[in-house]
Image (spheres, rainbow, N blue to C red):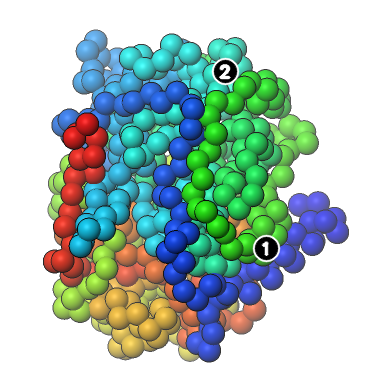
Amino acid sequence: MNDTPASADRLDIVLRYHQRTKHHIGHYARALGFMDWANQPDPFRRFEGAPLLRLVRPVDDLGPTYDALFDGSWAEQATARRRAPAPAPDQAPPKAGAGGLIRADQVSAFFYYGLALSAWKAIKGSRWSLRVNPSSGNLHPTEGYLISGPIEGLTDRPAVMHYAPFEHGLEVRRWIEPASFRTLCHAFGAVGLVALSSIHWRESWKYGERAYRYCQHDVGHAIGALSLSAARLGWQVSLIESVGDADLVALLGLDRQTGVEAEHPDALLAIVAPEPADAGLSKATAPQTLVWREAIEQIGAAPLLGEPNLLSREHHPWPIIDEVTHAGAKPSPTGYNPAAAHEPSGVIPSHAAEAPERDSAWLDLQRAQRQALAGRLIRQRRSALDMDGRTRLRAADFYVMLARTLPSASHPVWRGWPWPACIHLTLFVHRVDELTPGLYLLIRRPGAEDLLRRLLSSEFEFSKPPGAPEGLGLYRLQAGDYREAANAICCHQDIAEAGAFAVAMLAEFEPRLISPGPWFYRRLFWETGLIGQLLYLEAEAAGVRATGIGCFFDDVLHSVLGLEGQALQSLYHFTVGGAVDDTRLQTLEAYQHLDRT
């Protein structure tokens, strides 16, 4: 990092924002303090006047089981299907040489299991939609874009398209020249690109200044959802870190948006086909120059189609969100840096290839895993509104659940994440078979144990629980009943103690904001969202439910753990257990509003 006064100022703004937006027992982070229902933002961004390309929704789930996404078998089958003469309609990987996603049914399935509506809930004349990708308060600040070549059955021209989940369609924001699209794909070893942006107003309407944090959680959830949807098709999505936020703004045309409702750039993801036939599109050809920038400039010069709809009639400004947005922006590279295309600089090398050794007991646990269809499980995911305080979790499910949060080379989510694990899990274990209730720690990066032992309370025992699989970095810190503590820390929410276990996600914090830089603040939250998405789906696979908890007393948890300073900070909480459904709510089909037309 270039330690200039400007970069030091940005770091100070990010650190001050984080400190200022902590909840405390005596007072909460700044917000309106009431629900301004008259100005509740429209949850659906539309670009009025833009051509809408409707996608045909998948009828049958012909995909793999959920567990097959993780054991490597589905990826091997996908490679075999690429060589087969007649693959199943929505499961064949895209043709690499063409620089496009090829078929409309593939694109439809990608978004249907990635960012689409999953259901509607209704009560007493009111209704609201749920989505495959979870969101804080179900407010959905995250918008998705597809940058694609010709799509068979949909369009014969490359385009930048906005995904409209209400219509399950793609709005053409700009048509682009084939040469520019090919240059972009060749530069990033991709057959297409997906981009994510955030409308901070959607969260700040309810949560005030803390909303910026929640927007970043949601980006992580969306990346995780898209990663698993891609894996279901035999594809992979990978985070591209060799571009800056300004580049993404130009690509998507976000520079034309102003005011509180403007979208802000987040992530650019490469869609990668397994073993692409055209070596020119392989990962080995990650950008050797900044040639992609010229392509983005050409695309950015193309006319924009459509105008963003108005989400609210009136707005309450939160200047600190604008400040931290500016301070946390990822700079655009000024020259070619090979490390930016492979291993990002400023942190220790990724350990993605260093999967923990598995003993026979561990393999038995995996063989005993549930066999649910991935698509069905993805679309049935719900956030638990309440938990019963009785349901116990099998130790086998608990251990597999934790292991699925660990990076490995074959993991459908983490193989596209270019950074080493910076988030570790503090676990309040309440009701897990064969495990003593108490406070536990899952260390997600090999080599981080010394750091955590040094920073956490010296009174913790750091003992390996009997029966835990070898290679799982799980430690018991202290035995005891932590239900009351979990409740108190999570803003006195009963759901934190009523689950089988609760999670507090600890980030390696201030050192990571010094190097690589303040922009890494968002990546830390994205990583928590990725973990949260996996916990959501693992809970579904185990027959229970999960929910993310954004309201917690940051420093109360730090005190429980004996933490001082900002080397470690709590960023996200979760709970997993037996859900209690609200029988007053009616559940409606996700796209019943389209089926009636």
Identify which residue is drawn at 53% across, 38% down.
308
Q: Is residue 260 above or below residue 109?
A: below
In the rendered structure, which disc, 1 or 2, sits on the residue that comes first in sequence?
Answer: 2
Q: Is residue 2 above or below residue 454?
A: above
Identify which residue is drawn at 61% across, 82% down.
564
Residue 280 is at least partly visible in this image: yes
Along the horizontal axis of the image, is 512 left or right of 222? Answer: right
| Numbered mark located on residue 319 in the image | 1
* Residue 254 x, y percent position in the rendering: 62, 38
Question: What is the three-letter code of the residue carrying label 2?
Answer: Ile
Along the horizontal axis of the image, is 80 left or right of 388? Answer: right
**How far is mark 1 from mark 2, CA to CA?**
36 Å
* Residue 406 x, y percent position in the rendering: 40, 55
Question: What is the three-letter code of the residue carrying label 1?
Answer: Pro
Closer to us: 596 or 194 = 596
Q: Is residue 440 above or below residue 368?
A: below
Give the crowd class for mark 2: few <14, some 14-19, many >=20 residues within 10 Å. Answer: many
* Residue 294 x, y percent position in the rendering: 70, 22
**Circle 1 sits in a helix, a strand or a loop, which is it?**
helix
